[in-house]
Amino acid sequence: MPSTNGHGLRRAILYVRVSTDEQARSGYSLAQQIEALRAYAAREGYEVLEEVQDPGQSGASLERPGMDRVRDLVAAGSISVVLAQDRDRFAREPAYHYLLRREFEEYGTKIRALNDRGDDSPEGELTEGIFDQLAKFERTKTAERTRRGMLRKAREGRACSTRPKYGFRYNEARGGLLIYKPEMKVVEKIFQLAAEGLGFNAIQNRLLLEGVPTAKGKRVWAMRTLKKLLTSDEYRPHSFEEIRQLVTPEVAARLNPYEEYGIQWYNRQKVVVRTIAEPDGNGGRRYRKSRTFIWRPREEWVAIPVPAYLPRTLVDKANVALENRQPYERKHPARTWELRGLMWCGCGLKMSTRTAQPKGASRRYHYYECKRYRSYKEACPSFQQSFRAEKVEERVWSFVSDLLKNPERIKAGMEALIEQEQANGPRHFAKEEATWAEKVAECARLRSAYQDQQAAGLMTLDELGAKLKELERTRELAQAELAAITLRKERVEELEINRDVLLESLSNMIPEALDTLEPEERSSIYRMLQLEITPALKVSRLAGHSTSLS
């Protein structure tokens, strides 16, 4: 990177990032990056405004707490440069580099990395773009080689799971699975309980009472784990004839025709992970991982034989019993829970609902309670973990109805909520949308140009295929970002519609009528207001007001 000494004091932001995998694999530490950036900033005469860290964050998305902070600081102005140790610390996708560069240029801010090879000239930008594409190409090739290697391993009948399922262990060569009897005895017990007609909740409680720990040593078996275990083909014995139809002749030749085998499936699903930033109700953002599971065509699945242990009759009987379980029949009319889905415990979990009726009593009691105990059999660390539904609902409605009787306060609060949603979304809907649309159009132009070059004999078909594949990935990324911006815009539009509908209905309603609304109508109003409630703390995101429920 060229020296910038002698041009006066300028303000810089130091940005460091490391993903969980990188840190675990290579010790690519945040401290090491910060030290290198501090030394560079001091040498080049930069005033460091802030050091921003993104620990455990992937570079495959821009939705990161630290990167959001950097973008906010740049938008505030007076930032000369954002520094990182390597270009891929900003993002691993060249398209994201392009977006950040365009966004920061509007505020007079540059992106710099210690491994930059070019300068600000068109030739320098071309050089950096080439190196970015080469780095992306190498990552893609490495991922493709890994995928093809795992696929070849699966077709050869060797185990491909990163960790063997409960009841199995790897053999010495780690190419196959062996039965681990202490755990497989537990699996057999689970299937026996299911065959006797017990549901998932009953099985979970039985294992807890008998002190049977999970594979990771936890006291409580997760419901999802039990469902996967009871429906997995790895525990269901298959005859040699059934297995032979699913594997290659080479794999079948290694099997004992007089034994039964379970099936470990490989390549059934493709998992797409995205980071999503949402308003947290307190003026900030919270981040969550969104995982989308895409089923591959049946012909692409690969069957890997594994040792069988359970009797097939037991497995089939358990599956039939689970399929034929009768749904729960309510003895009393269903209750309308006004705050269902809106109550959050102080420990961070969403609260569930529960109805209790003591033996011999005619009265039934309704509660909103932390689901930590019911789901995980753990004590809730918050002050109070359950609340009488009638009392909470009445108190919340009393507070909300007081606000509703003053439409101007509601209007101001809803507008503040809309502004917050806009601020926490893409910083400039129109600008980002135009940038990504331009990227899609650029991909179309380059695709046509590459095809013309191949037709003119300037590149081979293999080179054309590689470039078109890379373009398609960039185009899909740009379209996904356009879709995300569209969803954010639709959410803002929905809030605006809710505001108008609510204000119009209030203008036509006398204040006394609010006290006669049905529970369903109250719940509808809560959702229009984007209400969230944390008992013993505060009601948040309620038209800019809060109240205590403790």
Image (cartoon, rainbow, N blue to C red):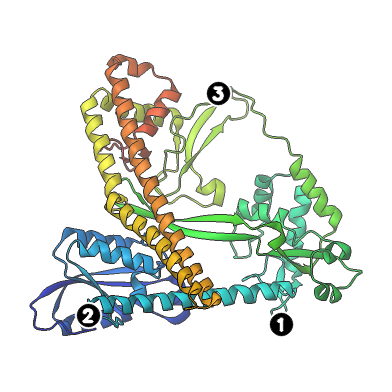
Q: Nearer the viewer, residue 357 or 55?
A: 55
Q: Nearer the viewer, mark 3 or mark 1?
A: 1
Left or right? Give the position of 388 relative to 143: left
Task: Locate residue 382, reporting x and y percent.
Answer: 40, 48
Mark 3 or mark 1, earlier in chain: 1
**Could you say which disc has been placed on residue 363 in the image?**
3
Helix, strand or loop for disc 3: loop
In the rendered image, which quarter contains the C terminus?
top left
Q: Is residue 48 above or below residue 205?
A: below
Helix, strand or loop for disc 1: loop
| C-alpha separation, residue under disc 3 versus residue under disc 1 | 62 Å
Helix, strand or loop for disc 2: helix
Mark 3 or mark 2, earlier in chain: 2
Q: Is residue 86 visible?
A: no
Check disc 2 and report the residue beneath it. 38
Q: Nearer the viewer, residue 444 or 428?
A: 444
Which kind of residue does numbered mark 2 sit on?
Answer: Arg
Residue drawn where x is 64% and y is 53% of the image: 208
Q: Is residue 310 visible?
A: yes
Left or right? Give the position of 142 relative to 239: left
Check disc 1 and report the residue beneath it. 172
**How many numbered dots are placed on residues in this image?**
3
In the rendered image, which quarter contains the N terminus?
bottom left
Which kind of residue does numbered mark 3 sit on?
Answer: Arg
| C-alpha separation, residue under disc 3 versus residue under disc 2 | 68 Å
Task: Locate residue 288, reporting x and y percent.
Answer: 43, 55
